[in-house]
Image: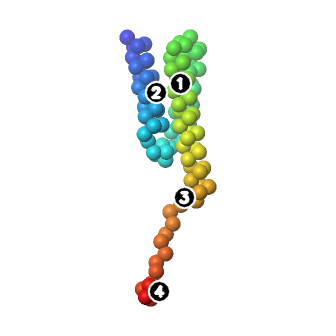
Amino acid sequence: MVFQSSYIGLVLIMIAWLLQLYYAKKDRIKKRFIILYVLGTAWIVIDSLIYDNVTVAIFNIIILALACFVLIKVGHYQISNKKNGAKKTKKKKVSKKKRK
C-alpha cells in the first residue's frame, strides 16, 4: 500500500506543476525554488534507477521535465522584462503654473 501511495503523491505533484504552468502568473515563482526542485527530483530519479524502481523513475522524469520547463519559462519572462525596460517609472509632477 505504501508503494501505491507514492504513485498518488507523484501524480499530485505533476498536476500541481501543470496548474502552475497554466494558471499562475509568470513572476510568482522564484528561480531558486525551481532549481532546488529540479536537483531534488533528479536525485530521486537517480535513486529510483539505482534500486530498479523504473515506474517511479519515469514519473519523476516527467516531473523533472515540467520543472525545467517552468525554469525556462520564468527565466525567459524575466529576461524579456529586462530588455523591454519594464521598470516602474515615476510620474512627472506638472506645476500649476504650467497647466494654465
Of callouts 3 and 2, which one flags the residue occurring earlier in the amino acid sequence?
2
The amino acid type, in three-letter code, at marker 1 is Ile
> Can residue 72 be seen at all in this image of the molecule?
yes
Name the amino acid, label 2: Met
The picture places residue 50, in percent across and down from the top left corner, at 59, 14
Q: Residues within 10 Å of mark 1 (few under 14, many from 20)?
A: some
Return the mark for residue 35.
Answer: none
- Place of residue 9 in the rendered image (x, y in percent of width and height, measured from the top left): 41, 22
Q: Residue at x 54, y 43 (%)?
A: 74
Sequence-wise, the earlier of marks 4 and 3 is: 3
Q: Amino acid at mark 4?
A: Lys
Name the residue beneath numbered marker 1. Answer: 62
**Seen from this angle, which residue lies furthest right?**
83
| Numbered marks: total | 4
Report the residue marked by disc 2: 14
Task: Give neighbour class at mark 2: few <14, some 14-19, many 20+ (Cα, 10 Å).
Answer: some
